[in-house]
Image (cartoon, rainbow, N blue to C red):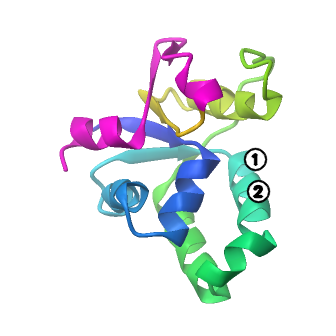
């Protein structure tokens, strides 16, 4: 089974809207794809999802339920240190560092700074659509 790290934008999209990110998230929840996560990604996700602009789409219960599944399905790892591959948005280096720390096969992102790398340290960087093709719709 493949192992992937989801960028924060994928986690947010999976929570707030029905669509391809949620469909991919359901692959994780259904044990068809292994998710690697770090405490730092989890914290950043919670910070982002608490923004006022997302409140119309969510209830506190939605967030609690999502995070509970996240915590029960993801394998938490410690990100490696010293990754500085993305100068335009240094915060994105956390995704790369977590993927390396968790020996992930894939990084799934919608962020151009990450996607433009194509591959990093033998980890393929793909869109949600491509990851769905890989795991089979």
User: Residue 117 location, x and y as percent?
Assistant: 56, 16
Residue at 39% in and 46% down: 34
User: Residue 6 location, x and y as percent?
Assistant: 53, 44
Magenta stretch holds residue 20? no
User: Residue 73 location, x and y as percent?
Assistant: 46, 59
Is 71 on the left or on the right of 128, as rendered? right
Is 71 on the left or on the right of 82, as rendered? left
Relative depth, front residue between 85 and 38: 85
Q: Which residue is mark 2?
A: 43
Quadrant location, the N terminus: top left
Is 88 on the left or on the right of 71, as rendered? right
Residue at 47% in and 30% down: 104
**What secondary structure is marked by label 2?**
helix
Residue at 57% in and 63% down: 71
**What secondary structure is marked by label 1?**
helix
| Disc 1 from disc 2: Cα separation | 5 Å
Magenta residues? 112-137
Q: Which residue is mark 1?
A: 40
Among the 4 quarters of the image, the one containing residue 43? bottom right
Query: Around disc 1, counting alpha carbons within 10 Å, would you say few (fewer than 14), some (14 to 19), or many (20 or more)?
Result: some
Magenta stretch holds residue 123? yes
In this picture, is 5 found above or below 57?
above
Relative depth, front residue between 42 and 24: 24
User: Residue 37 location, x and y as percent?
Assistant: 59, 46
Say which mark, if any, is on residue 106.
none
In this picture, is 71 found above or below 40?
below
Q: CB atoms at circles 1 and 2 under 8 Å apart?
A: yes
Query: Around disc 2, counting alpha carbons within 10 Å, would you say few (fewer than 14), some (14 to 19), or many (20 or more)?
Result: few
Is 42 on the left or on the right of 76, as rendered? right
């Amino acid at each position: 089974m493949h192992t992937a790290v989801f960028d924060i934008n994928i986690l947010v999209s999976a929570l707030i809207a029905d669509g391809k990110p949620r469909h991919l998230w359901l692959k994780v929840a259904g044990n068809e794809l292994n998710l690697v996560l770090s405490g730092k990604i989890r914290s950043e996700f919670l910070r982002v999802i608490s923004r006022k602009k997302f409140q119309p789409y969510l209830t506190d219960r939605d967030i609690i339920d999502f995070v509970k599944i996240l915590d029960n399905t993801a394998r938490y790892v410690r990100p490696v240190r010293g990754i500085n591959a993305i100068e335009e948005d240094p915060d994105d280096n956390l995704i790369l560092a977590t993927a390396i720390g968790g020996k992930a096969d894939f990084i799934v992102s919608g962020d151009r700074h990450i996607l433009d790398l194509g591959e990093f340290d033998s980890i393929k960087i793909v869109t949600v659509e491509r990851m769905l093709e890989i795991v089979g719709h």
